[in-house]
Image (spheres, rainbow, N blue to C red):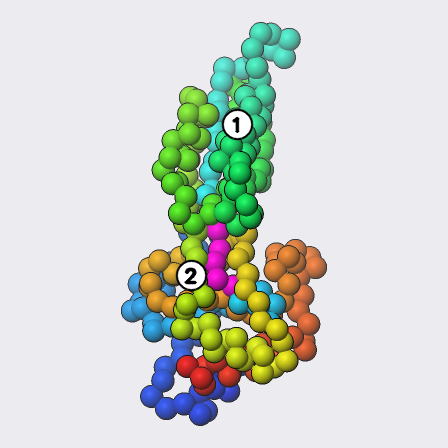
């Protein structure tokens, strides 16, 4: 984005292009993006995210981060009742079952809820046993998050269920004034344009509803490799993406 902005700016007068390097994009609360939502809304916004140099992303699912905490008087493993670990597992199974019920009959993964068990553990001080779970859910745009939380709290029973962060899903559409310039620029660079909807979350879900301006996500790279040891970029695609972005900025 910075390279394309520098190239485009040489031929533009009276236009302000602001490039933001937002920190914490994959952390709870997205602190960088949350900070810039306090700025005046721009006329247009392009989120830099790997979608492939010939693809334009129109939406992301949201995310809900939960911490489950259960504490019980210590019990002998041969005694009656369930251990805190078994109760925590039962809660997780209930979360999976609830998501499956909501997803039933829905076509396309973008419109579904996807739960993930990110961490789990148990401790005991000899007097009390405790179990904790870290649970994340990817949420489609338009989901009734309050109703979902109500169901999950019912599943948790007397365990504590803390909301560590929540971002609603966000989706724009092909009628955005940003779309035609990208399609033309991708074709001019030798590509066949395509649209994508991401199953993860990006800063689009933070700034999109706050700014309510035309917005898309674009960038070279393979999103399937994001945040993995295999994350990488093909330099030829990087160069094509700079050309595409430069053409888009000049066109706009």
Residue bounds of the magenta highlight: 57-63
Residue 127 in picture, x, y percent from top left:
52, 16
On screen, residue 15 above or below 173? below
Residue 106 in picture, x, y percent from top left:
52, 42
Residue 201 in picture, x, y percent from top left:
50, 54
At horizontal 54% and vertical 30% (from top left) the residue drawn is 97
Would residue 203 appear left or right of 236 to someone viewing this image?
Answer: left
Q: Nearer the viewer, mark 2 or mark 1?
A: 2
* Residue picked out by circle 2: 172
At horizontal 43% and vertical 57% (from top left) the residue drawn is 171
On screen, residue 174 above or below 100? below
On screen, residue 72 above or below 64? above
- Of 239 and 87, nearer the camera is 239
At horizontal 53% and vertical 57% (from top left) the residue drawn is 197
Quadrant where the C terminus lies?
bottom left
Answer whether residue 99 is visible to the viewer in this image: no
* Residue picked out by circle 1: 94
Would residue 249 appear left or right of 189 to someone viewing this image?
Answer: left
Q: Is residue 61 magenta?
A: yes
On screen, residue 211 above or below 77? below
């Amino acid at each position: 984005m910075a390279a394309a902005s520098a190239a485009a700016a040489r031929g533009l007068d009276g236009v302000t292009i602001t490039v933001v390097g937002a920190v914490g994009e994959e952390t709870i609360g997205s602190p960088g993006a949350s900070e810039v939502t306090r700025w005046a809304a721009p006329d247009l916004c392009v989120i830099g995210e790997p979608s492939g140099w010939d693809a334009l992303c129109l939406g992301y699912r949201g995310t809900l981060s939960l911490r489950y905490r259960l504490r019980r008087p210590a019990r002998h493993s041969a005694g009656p009742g369930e251990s805190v670990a078994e109760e925590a597992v039962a809660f997780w199974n209930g979360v999976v079952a609830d998501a499956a019920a909501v997803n039933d009959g829905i076509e396309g993964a973008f419109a579904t809820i996807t739960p993930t068990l990110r961490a789990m553990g148990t401790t005991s001080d000899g007097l009390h046993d405790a179990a904790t779970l870290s649970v994340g859910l990817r949420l489609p745009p338009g989901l009734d998050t309050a109703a979902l939380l109500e169901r999950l709290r019912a599943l948790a029973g007397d365990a504590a269920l803390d909301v560590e962060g929540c971002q609603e899903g966000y989706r724009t559409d092909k009628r955005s004034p940003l779309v035609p310039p990208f399609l033309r620029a991708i074709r001019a660079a030798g590509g066949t344009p395509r649209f994508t909807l991401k199953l993860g979350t990006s800063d689009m879900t933070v700034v999109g509803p706050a700014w309510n301006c035309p917005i898309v996500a674009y960038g070279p790279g393979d999103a399937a490799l994001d945040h993995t040891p295999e994350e990488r970029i093909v330099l030829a695609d990087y160069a094509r993406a700079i050309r595409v972005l430069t053409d888009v900025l000049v066109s706009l």
